[in-house]
Structure formats: structure tokens, C-alpha cells
Amino acid sequence: MSLAKKRILIAKPGLDGHDVGAKVVAMALRDAGADVIYTGLRKSPDYIADVAVDEGVHAVGLSVLSGSHLSLASDVIAALDARGAGDVAVFLGGTIPHTEHKALLDMGIRAIFTADETLDDVLTRFDAALGET
Amino acid sequence: MTGVVTLPSGIEVPVVARGPGAERLGDPGEYPFTRGIFPDGYRGRLWTMRQYSGFGTAEETNARYRFLLDHGQTGLSVALDLPTQCGYDPDHPMARAEIGKVGVSLFSRREMEILFRGIGLDAISTSFTINGTAAVIFAMYLAVADRKGVPRSALTGTIQNDILKEFVARGTWIFPVQPSVRLVADTVMFAGEEAPRFNAISIAGAHVRDAGVTAAEEMAFTLANGLAYVDALIARGGDPARFGSRLSFFFYVHMDLFEEVAKFRAARRIWADLMRTRYDVTDPAAQQLRFGVVCGGSSLTAQQPLNNVVRVAVENLAAVFAGAQSIFTCAYDEAFQIPSEQSAELALRTQQIIAHESGAASSVDPLGGSYLVESLTDSMEEEIRAVMGELDDYGGVIVAIEDGYLQTRVARRALERKGQIDRGERVVVGVNRYADGRPPEIGEMFALDDGTAARVLEKLDRLKAARDERRMGETLRALAKAAEHDDENLMPHIVACCHADATVGEITDVLRDRWGEFDEPVRF
């Protein structure tokens, strides 16, 4: 896996306070050798983009379980673009209905993860999607 | 369910069955309440069926409440949206994406009035899952009652108001730990005087359990938080013999039926012992662990969602065997969306079938005396006390929260649980056993109205245009002044703010200015 050389920001945009999924994925990525930063709760898209640029990350993983993922994901992508960081891969995890996956992928989300997947699968897909960059 | 109860075959069912060892356990309704807090269990009164519900605007949620009440629900449980829970008005930049999403938007007292249109505040008990802004929402509810002419003393219900667990899981904290606990103590003290039938706190283990910890840790963290609140209330002049009877608890029921029954029986015994030995409380009502539960949560799956109906029924049965005072059964689609009317109705019917057809409610503590259940109850008690001891050794829950120890412990447990499921060590049917690989078929989808946010923002504008700004400003300044001193109860001031149409965001900002915000320890 190429995760070992990657810097990854795990972020909680919006007001959702469910952080266990974000922390579990952060720990799994760290165990796989990635250099992981976690924002903590309740961050604005601008804040997340600022941290992503300052820290020079390869990827941002967003975690949203409040149903607000469409607008928050789109805002984070726009905030990265506005900072000339459109090449940072953006991933999304949480309570994301299958019916909305296509719209999210179309707007530029690299991959979507839900609780039903094994962590091994999450890491494999994360790695594969990052390898495309 | 009074008088003689018989099996369909005509055999009489005893209210309480007793056998060898019964003396050691004590009777239901007697210290240490292992067998339950009421002598006649559910014969006197069934548990409250309280389905958590709320979304969009106050108008939309009011319609859903009337639907649930028409179908036999016996209590209301209000889900609030995240801006209301975190103390932001709908027009705050952090709020706009979240308006009406996971609950109803209640930014002012006038919205609360709409929420209860056509529903008698004194005719129904209402539970609010609210923590960071619990004082404000409680004040709003009191203000609505005042205006409807309902005496505060007639109000029954609960605000969750358990801020300590918000720091550990769920995350709707606002202020630092110490002033947050002060605000909790103020609401409990004020309710004791003004609304003595209302539970101003529901100390909750549900969220840490759902996040990942074991059943024993769920009970230990919660009882330890309970002790922290009792200590804070005593420090603010409260008498545990009085406020003790208004403390309530809230837990998850997950899938292992016997583990769940054992944990509740053990926790009742421990709490009664702690209230007696630590605080010299002798009034049985103040020794009793009264609790509500939620069945579902993270034990539900998005795959093969109809399987969740069966899971919730098993968990519901465990809650009844354990003697819960109120039960919320999740809808089968709740793992991924706001429940549809159809799934919400089925969740309520599940409770009604268990209550009226299964016989589970006929006899108090029906598993009491079972070799297995008594043995597991004893082991669970030992384990819960051991975890409480670890927290004590750490320096208590407040320190363990401030420096992030508990948060990290929950996250590590979540990783362990995920590993067990991934490796198939813990079977989840439809996920790691008997999976069919098909995408989930959800059936009827609940769709939130796209126009909700715009309507809420419009209502906020109308409120601000209509209210008496000068009078409102005076109430906010009075609150700010009271918050400068630790010895004054803030609740009367917050109620005055609500009467004067101050918003949740405005009231919270007064306290934010004074206390600052929690500095989250980011560790994982």
C-alpha cells in the first residue's frame, strides 16, 4: 500500500457530533502507516481547507452523519479549489444514502465509505483512489 | 392491567414470583431494587412508549406528533436540529446546512408554541433530547406553559441535560466543563422548586454505548457521571434526599438479551447502594434508578433493513424484562434516514404487541431467580464497580473528560468492536453472516422538504421584526449580569429571555461571552 507515504486530514464539517467513525478510520489509517491529522468537531469548510493547505495533505476525509453531506462536501471542495488545492483528494464517510452517491461522485468526491464496509476494504479503496493521483 | 392476570390457559400469573434466594434479592419496590422499583411492576402502569421524533419546521413536527398520539403513543420525545442543540440561530454560518435535518428547528419560544399546537402540555409527558442548550429549551417550555395558563407544577417530562456525556460522545457541548455542570445544576435546582414533577436531567449512557463501549462501561461511565452531578448539586446547596428522586437515567439496549437484563438489574442495585452509603439518603424514591431506554441504534444495519424489526423486538423484550420506565423503539430504517410514517408506526406497534400480547409485562422481574440471570447480574455488578474504580483512580470523570481520556477510551473500544465485526467474531446477520451482497432495499423513503431552511429563516426574520427589542435586550443584559456570579441561579433569567422572544443563539451567546467554549482535546 502507498498509504505509508501519505498525509491525510480527517475532518468533521458542520455541527454533527458523532466522531467515532472519523476516529476509527483515522486510527486505521494511522495503523496502516499514514500521517493522520484530525480536526476535532464542528469545523467550517473554510477552516478545513485552510488546514489541508497549511499541512500539505494528499487527502481530506470528511465525516458527516447529520444528513448535511451534500452541501458540506460541496462547500469543502469549493474551498479547496479557491485555495488552488483542487488536487487534494476528498473522501466522504458517514450516513450517506446510496441514492446520493452518484451526485457526490459527480461533484468530485473521490470515494464514499459507510459503516457497513470492513476497515480493510476502506483502506484498500482509500489507497487505490489515492494511487490514481 | 390490574386485578387477576391469567395465562391463556387460565393459570393465574403471580404479580411477583419468589423462590430460594428471594430474601437476598429483596422484593420489587424495595431496597436495593434489583428486581425493580415498583412493587407491582407494569401491572400498575405500563412503561411510557415514547418515540423520538422531530424534523424540519415546528409545523411539520407538530403534524407527526399528532399522528403518533392518534396511534396510541403515550409520551412525546422531541428531536431537535443541530443548530438548536449547539446554540446557533438558523442564520449563523455554521447552521445553514443543518436546519431541520436531524430534528426540529426550535429557535424561539414562538416555535415551541407551534410545536405543541393542539397538544395539552399538562396532558402528556414530553422528553427533550437536549443538552448544551437544555437550560434554554426547558425555559422555553416553561414560558409556553406560562402563556397557556398551565401551571409549571403540572408539567411532566424530561430534558436530557447530561452535558458530561456530550463531551465523551455525541458532541453537542458548548461551554467548558465546569460552567456546563453549573448550568445543569441550576436547571435541576430550579425544576425542584418550580416544576417538581419534571425530570430536569436524564443521565445517559446510551451514547457512549452506541459509540462503542461495553455494557459494563456504559453503566459505569453513567453512574460515575451521576455521582459528579450529585456532588455538584450538593455544592450548590441541594439536598440529595430531595433532588435524588428527580434524577433519571437513559441507556441503550443492544442485542444480547441476558447481558442487557443483567446490566440494568446490577445498576439499580449499585445506584441504591451509592445513594445510601455515600449520601446517607434513606428515602426509597431518592435511591431508585429510574431509566428510559432506546432499542436499536448502532445494533441496526443498513443491509437487509427489515432484519432490524426483529432486532428491535428482541431489545424491546429485554427492556421489559429489565423493568424500564420508558422505551423508544427505533424504526427499521432509522439506521440511514428519518423514519417514514409507516416504519415509525411499526416501531410503535412492536411495543404494543410486547405490552399486550406477549405476557412479558404480567409479572415483575420475570427473569429474577434464574441461575443464569442472577449469576450474570452479580458478575455485571462486579465489572461495573471495577470500571468505576478505574475512573476514580484517574481522578474522577471531570478530569478524565477535560484531558480526553474517556474520549480516547471510547474510540479505542469502537475500533475493537469494528474489528470483531469485520473478522466475524461478533455475528451480525446480513452483514458478516448470510450477507447477500445486494444493495439495501429501503422501501418508502422519507424526504425532507427542500424548502425547510428558507421557511425557518423567514420565520426568524419575522420574529426579529415583530418583537420588542428594548425589552428583549433588558432580559439578555440581566442574564449576563447574573452569569457573572456563581451563586445565582440563571434559570429565572433565561425564562424571562424566552418570554421576551430572545432566540436560542442570542441567549447562548450571552453565556459564551462569559464562559468561552470547550477546548476539545483532539486525541485519537
Image: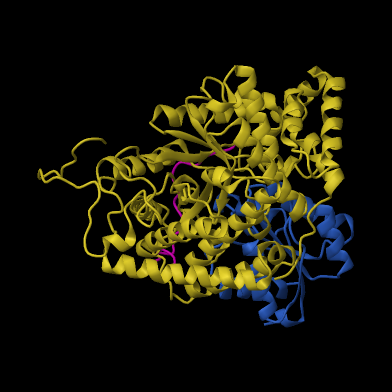
Chain colours: A blue, B yellow
Question: Within the magenta stretch, is there residue B438?
Answer: yes
Name the quadrant of the N terminus of chain B. Answer: top left
Residue pictured at 33% horizontal, 40% vertical: B352
Q: For residue B107, which quarter of the picture?
A: top right
Relative to B404, residue A105 above or below: above
Q: Where is residue B324 drawn, in percent x and y?
A: 41, 48
Residue pictured at 58% horizontal, 40% vertical: B79
Residue B163 shown left or right of residue B517 in the figure: left
Residue A4 shown left or right of residue B393 in the figure: right
Q: Where is residue A17 drawn, in percent x and y?
A: 67, 54
Name the quadrant of the C terminus of chain B. Answer: bottom right
Compare residues B277 and A88 and report the one nearer the observer. B277
Question: Within the magenta stretch, is there residue B291?
Answer: no
Residue B507 shown left or right of residue B283 in the figure: right
Chief secondary structure of the magenta span?
loop
Relative to B403, residue B148 above or below: above
Q: Where is residue B195 drawn, in percent x and y?
A: 59, 31
Q: Tell how many labels.
A: 0
Compare residues A1 and B43 and report the one nearer the observer. B43
Residue A125 visible here: no
Instruction: Find the magenta span and give its range.
Output: B430-448
Residue B70 visible here: yes
Residue A104 shown left or right of residue A98 in the figure: right
Compare residues B410 and B165 and report the one nearer the observer. B165
Relative to B223, residue B198 above or below: above
Q: Where is residue A114 drawn, in percent x and y?
A: 57, 61
